[in-house]
Amino acid sequence: MRILSAPLTAKDAPKLVVPTLFISSSDYDLMLIYAQTASPQEVNGYGLIDQGARDQFILCPGGLFITDQVVTQVSAKPTAVGNAYAGNRADEAGMTLGLQWHSHGRGGAYHSPTDMNTAHNYGRVGTIDWMIWVVINDRGDVVARLEQYAPIRIGVPMTVIVVPDNHQQLLEQVTDDIARHVRVETPPIPSKALAATPAFVSPDKKENTK
Ligand SMILES: [Zn+2]
């Protein structure tokens, strides 16, 4: 499991739950290849999302795609047809069109003021409750934000985790392996470790104990 970005930790804010986006290796690779091939131009695409737990969003394996669009080195805008196609594709799959991504070519992976505006204005249409906005660059850096539009408007950075394609199978296999081969040892408490060290016994005393 590769954690690509973890912009927040809950350490200092115990009540705060940072939403996580899970992406399979092959979908991450695909997004990266799109970004690299289009670079230095940008490229824009979509993703079909499954929501696991409330704070867990899973990019459906194979659910990453691009549509017709017009791009420059600093923008990537889907055409009306491209946008409609994305909606139809989600409907046909019975999935949520819950993610939009675009590349920044050779630039940094971050949400620019323009990106934030796009995300904000998207919610004004009023037809969706939330959308995940992802930015990737041609070096594979990734950031994601969850923008919620209803019932209240709030946006937070997400943790992005890339999981192997056969995640479940690997998880079971590795859990077995660890159970079989790895023994957990409680680390010795320093004072006890000292007590366990054989004390120096003088030869005289050794004689006496006999
Ligand atoms: Zn951007």
Image (cartoon, rainbow, N blue to C red):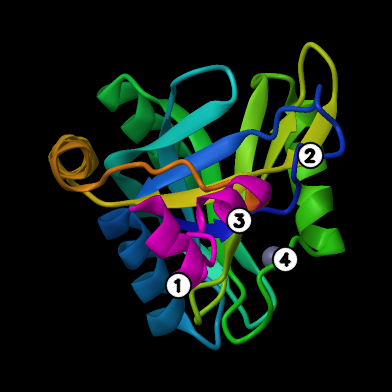
Disc 4 to disc 1, C-alpha distance: 71 Å
Residue ranking furthest to the top: 151
How many discs appear?
A: 4
**Disc 4 or 1, which lies upstream in sequence?**
4
**Disc 3 or 4, which lies upstream in sequence?**
4
Element under disc 1 = helix
Q: Point out the stretch of residues depicted in magenta.
A: 191-210
Disc 2 to disc 4, C-alpha distance: 23 Å
In this figure, which residue is indicated by the disc labeled 3? 194
Quadrant for residue 12, please give it: top right
In this figure, which residue is indicated by the disc labeled 4? 110
The amino acid beneath tag 1 is Pro
Element under disc 2 = loop
The amino acid beneath tag 2 is Lys
Rendering coords of residue 30 (x, y %): 32, 64
In this figure, which residue is indicated by the disc labeled 2? 11
Identify the residue at horizontal 64%, vertical 21% (top origin). Answer: 128
**Disc 3 or 2, which lies upstream in sequence?**
2
In this figure, which residue is indicated by the disc labeled 1? 203
Task: Judge whether 188 appears above or below 10 on screen.
Answer: below
